Image (cartoon, rainbow, N blue to C red):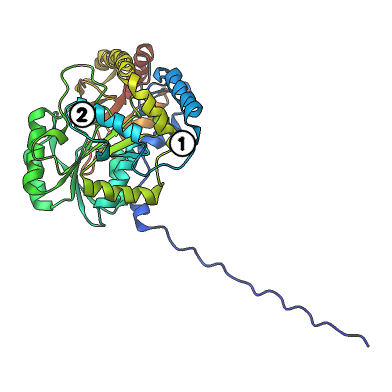
Amino acid sequence: MTVVEPAPHPHPRHTAAATPPLAARTGAVGGSPVREILAVTARPEVINFAGGLPAPELFDREGIAAAFHDVFAETPAQALQYSTTEGEPSLRAGLAARMSARGLPTDAGDLLVTTGSQQGLSLLATALLDPGDTVLVEDPCYLAALQAFGLAGARVVAVPGDADGVDPRALEELVTRERPKLFYTVPTFQNPTGRTLPAERRAAVAEVAARCGVWIVEDDPYGELRYDGERVPWIASYPGAEDRTVLLGSFSKVMAPGLRLGWLRAPAALRRACAVAKQAADLHTPTVNQLAAARCLAGLDAHVTRVRDVYRERRDAMLAGLAEALPDGSTWNRPQGGMFLWARLPGSYDTTALLPKVVRHNVAYVPGAPFYAGEPDRSTLRLCFVTQTPEEIGEGLRRLGEGLRG
């Protein structure tokens, strides 16, 4: 007998359902305009004043390589093993000694090592901010800080200022009215403007924070790159700021950004909260990088002195060429240190709209508008002067002038 098998049922057609949406905060915060500009201007013929990149030819390649060699020769098991979330004791002790020598008494236990100081901002946003909380920032402000606070769901409010930085009276008015969780500032050679907050304003900011009850997040990635004038103490060292200031630091601008090493100094309860946030993020910063950096600390001052001498010459080369490159009526500052110079063109100029035309002349800058939390000044731009030689800076400014004249 022949058995007839039943015909197989065709598989039912399934219409794939849409995946759940991304978190709303990812749509509210855009990418970094600086990173996007760098991608567009990566061609080697472009003289790039847009990036905030240290000069690679000045990296202490031999010293860093020797430090890694010694680490693997002497403590290979430790170097390749998990570490504590707070950071390697030798690095924290070395950093604490440097900070204490610069007028801010610090113990190793006061510090948390981070994977770049940018991670410090993210950890603070996690530890301090709930969606809807208010954050006060300088105007204009470091771009990646705006991103970090935006991703945390914070409401970001700009504090007015002038060529010397934030106005403490305006800060107090906004703290009283807005009840923010924190005020974020880069008081020394600020990104993007290069300006430095004077000592009397730092004291006033500390007094406002003490009287009104607000955290200060003091970001200091550029402070060691001083070319003129006297060092101004950290806000964290002023009376009233001791128990409410987080000080962020970084090796990116003075050692090498590829090491991704930063740190934060904070009061105990907040530091512990940041450590918990870091455990959820990456457990700890790479052990081998920390051990190598700890060995590099002994020669860091001499290295920074060499870097400062080169960067000072490059800053001066840019200052010497700006009058010819920029349109009549333009203004710019003379930063005492850091990496950036801030310029304002006449009001009829829109530096965002002009950038594609300028890039066709094989030179690039960063438009000022993205740095503003509030209403932007579209005639502003940021120029980084440390990455190119004086000769390249001169040629870049010549191209910039041609592009702006169009």
* The C terminus: image quadrant: top left
Residue drawn at 26 percent across, 12 percent down: 320
Residue drawn at 33 percent across, 50 percent down: 277
Secondary structure category for the residue under label 1:
helix
Residue 378, image x, y percentages: 25, 35
Comparing 221 with 154, the one in front is: 221
Comparing 187 with 268, the one in front is: 268
| Label drawn at residue 100 | 2
Amino acid type of disc 2?
Ser
Residue 213, image x, y percentages: 11, 49
* The N terminus: image quadrant: bottom right
Asked whether the viewer can see residue 59, the reply is yes
Q: CA distance from mark 1 to mark 2?
A: 28 Å
| Label drawn at residue 184 | none
**Which marked residue is nearer to the observer: mark 1 or mark 2?**
1
Q: How busy is the neighbourhood of tag 1: few (under 14 within 10 Å), some, or many (20 plus)?
A: some
210 left or right of 49 in image: left
Total count of labels: 2
79 left or right of 210 in image: right
Residue drawn at 39 percent across, 31 percent down: 356
Residue at the disc numbered 1: 78
225 left or right of 242 in image: right
Amino acid type of disc 1?
Gln
